[in-house]
Image: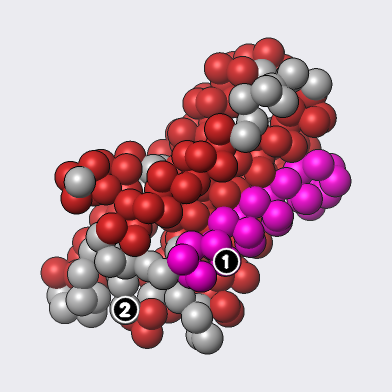
């Protein structure tokens, strides 16, 4: 069962969950498919935002700054989190540079992911929050928001997102990385922030 847990943890890793979310939205939302060149550009930025932090965290691990690649020690999480946030800010700058038009819903999605990470950095000072559930909760919240905004008719299948989150949470507990409290906190923060920001249409 640990092999299944590892597989779930890596397939739904928080660094590439935004890319998975974009892929799902491409498949279910005709409005997204109306902007192929813009979405390809967004996908490129999200890919860089996945690979660059992954390489940086790997170097921190090799230099002995991290006890493991899971960053399971709460006290070691500050710099990896700030690194991811740094790349996200660079990505936001790339997505809002002159000449690039990003639909407000998509920009709201990017901003919400950044806001979730900022909150996680502060919360981490007191309690270790699951980044897997933060990212995947945010992804599920994003799908709910797009369904609401674009009337996609996904209501019958949306609850499956909670089952997926439960499976990911099980994998993190099976690997001994998180407690149920840390998992629930991560999901609640991610789902709530992303859904609220995207549905509100708030974007800078």
Foreground pick, 95 / 171: 171
Q: Is residue 27 above or below residue 17?
A: above
Earlier in the chain: of badge 2 and badge 1, it is 2
> Residue 168: where, in percent of width, then height?
40, 48
Foreground pick, 50 / 25: 25
Residue stretch rendered in magenta on the structure: 180-204
Residue in view at x 34 percent, y 58 percent: 172
Q: Which residue is mark 1?
A: 185
Quadrant of the image occupied by residue 132: bottom left
Foreground pick, 171 / 100: 171
As drawn, the label of residue 73 is: 2
The answer to whether residue 181 is magenta is yes
Residue in view at x 80 percent, y 21 percent: 151
Q: Is residue 63 above or below residue 33?
A: below
Name the chief secondary structure element in magenta.
helix
Residue in view at x 56 percent, y 42 percent: 162
Apparent side of residue 68 relative to residue 115 in the rendered image (left or right): left
Q: Residues within 10 Å of mark 2 (few under 14, many from 20)?
A: few
Residue in view at x 64 percent, y 31 percent: 158
Coloured how? secondary structure
Which tag is nearer the camera, tag 2 or tag 1? 1
Q: Secondary structure at mark 2?
A: loop
Quadrant of the image occupied by residue 114: bottom right
The answer to whether residue 193 is magenta is yes
Q: CA distance from mark 2 to mark 1?
A: 17 Å
> Residue 193: where, in percent of width, then height?
70, 56
> Residue 21: where, in percent of width, then height?
53, 34
Q: Is residue 184 visible?
A: yes
Q: Is residue 141 above or below residue 126?
A: above
């Amino acid at each position: 069962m640990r092999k299944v847990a590892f597989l779930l943890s890596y397939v739904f890793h928080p660094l590439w969950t935004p890319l998975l979310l974009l892929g799902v939205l491409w498949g279910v939302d005709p409005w997204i498919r109306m902007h192929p060149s813009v979405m390809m550009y967004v996908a490129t930025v999200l890919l860089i935002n996945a690979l660059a932090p992954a390489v940086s965290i790997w170097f921190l691990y090799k230099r002995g700054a991290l006890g493991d690649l899971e960053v399971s020690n709460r006290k070691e999480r500050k710099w990896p989190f700030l690194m991811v946030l740094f790349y996200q800010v660079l990505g936001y700058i790339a997505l809002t540079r002159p000449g690039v038009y990003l639909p407000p819903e998509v920009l709201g999605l990017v901003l919400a992911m950044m806001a979730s990470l900022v909150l996680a950095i502060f919360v981490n000072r007191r309690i270790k929050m699951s980044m897997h559930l933060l990212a995947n909760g945010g992804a599920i919240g994003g799908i709910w928001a797009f369904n609401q905004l674009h009337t996609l008719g996904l209501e019958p299948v949306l609850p499956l997102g909670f089952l997926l989150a439960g499976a990911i949470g099980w994998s993190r507990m099976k690997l001994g990385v998180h407690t149920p409290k840390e998992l629930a906190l991560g999901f609640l923060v991610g789902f709530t922030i992303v859904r609220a920001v995207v549905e509100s249409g708030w974007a800078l």
